Image (cartoon, rainbow, N blue to C red):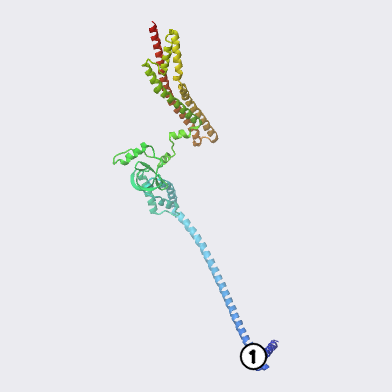
Amino acid sequence: MRNVLALSLAGVLAFSVSAVSNAAESLSHSDLLKKVRDKERIQEQVNNQRVQTFQRQKNRQADLLADAKAKLAAEEAKSERLKASFDENEKQLTQIAEDLRIKQGNLGELFGVVRQAANSLSGDISSSLVSAQYPGRGALLDKLIEAEELPKMDDLRGFYVLMLQELSEQGNTASFAADVVNEEGRTETQTVERIGTFNLLSGNDYLIFDKGQIKTLQVQPSAEVRDLAADYESAASGYAGLYIDPTKGGILQLEKLKMSLADRLWKFKGFAGSTVMILLAIGLLIALERLFTLYMVTGPKVASQKKSSTPGNNPLGRVMKVYLANKDEDVENLELKLDEAVLKETPKIERGINLIKVIAALGPLLGLLGTVVGMIEVFQSITLHGTGDPRLMADGISQALVTTVWGLLAAIPLTFLHAVVAGKSKSIIHVLEEQSTGLMAQHDENNA
């Protein structure tokens, strides 16, 4: 069938070619058949070669697959051997570790003791003032704390030397140059004097060692303490006095939290304290006005009037005017007139004095009121929170004490001023009574 189709196709092609080109010769059927068969044979050879190539590649893929399977089997066998070896090594390591633990004996306890001691000493070393002079001393301690094996002899020796250094430096003073952070936050190099493990000084300023830095104390101690520090710095030899902080900076740190008496009075004045302040201001104004009037105005005028026979505009002058206006009266009427004139001047002279006395008496009473209110708050805090934390009661106690101070601050000066003003007013009234009596005596003598 295939030959017939090929022959038909060849005939069609030959007929087409002959129809297109009239000059070409016509081929015979036998020649055309031969050519077709030759081409088929060539094509068959090509197809056979391709089949052979495909077959060879297939065989090669099979060989590669077999080789891969062989390698996989070899690797799986190797994995089994390694796993068995690993398990055996694990057993040996466990046995070796157990043998090591048994053989270590007391050395294992030594390791724990060293780590515990290093951990305990690390906090002291980090905050010690000696570390301000010798920074970086805590590196060895950190190494011993984090170690997972027995410490070496060099490390143990260094730990021993570090402990001896800390003990010996506690009784020594040293001067060294170091970077100091001042009050403004700037770092500058200063000469620092270390007093054992108690204080750091720079001139008359106290320093603190905080988080690996030397800092100037923000709130310095009192002038007396600083002057003594300056004397210590300037002392060339011998002995010199100095205030030290046995808490290694704790007390100095509390200086910035310490409040002065003025701050406490202002912070805890409360209602009673505010009222006492107002009354104190009023009492002082009245007392100052009375002092000025009696000592600078009335007193000098009365003293001048005693030396003059001409009545003036002052209490004694007005009494003399009454005498001159009624000197023709009988003795009894004149005496009554003069007593009336003295009594009329007395309220002007004594004006405000009793008010000063009242304010001076109210001050302690208001202070006592504030004390009672503060103690009520203290008892309420005790009822709610118990007595475990004294700071919870501090506000009430402060109010109780401070209001008492406010009362005393008002009472003491006002009581003194009241005594002064009252004494001066009594002396002026005494002069008026004395002069009126003298005028009466003069009148009797003139009428005799």
Q: In front: 63, or 433? A: 433
Q: Quadrant of residue 16?
A: bottom right
Q: Residue furthest left?
A: 237
Give the residue at x 57% y 78%.
Answer: 60
Quadrant into which the C terminus falls? top left
Mark 1 is surrounded, within 10 Å at the Cα level, by few (under 14), some (14 to 19) or many (20 or more) other residues, namely few
Give residue 81's position: percent from left, percent from top: 53, 66
Work out whether 433 lies above or below 383.
Answer: above
Q: Can residue 429 be seen in this view?
A: no
Q: Where is residue 315 in the image (x, y as percent from the top left)?
A: 42, 18
Which residue has dot 1 on it?
A: 35
Confirm whether residue 225 shows in the render.
yes
Nearer to us in this view, 142 or 338: 338
Q: Is residue 417 above or below residue 236?
A: above
Q: Is mark 1 on a helix, strand or loop?
A: helix
Front residue of this view, candidates 421 and 313: 313
> Which quadrant is home to the N terminus?
bottom right
* Residue 185, horizontal then vertical, whole percent: 41, 46
Q: Which residue lies furthest to the top in this view?
A: 448
Q: Which amino acid does label 1 sit on?
A: Lys
For residue 5, side relative to residue 354 (left or right): right
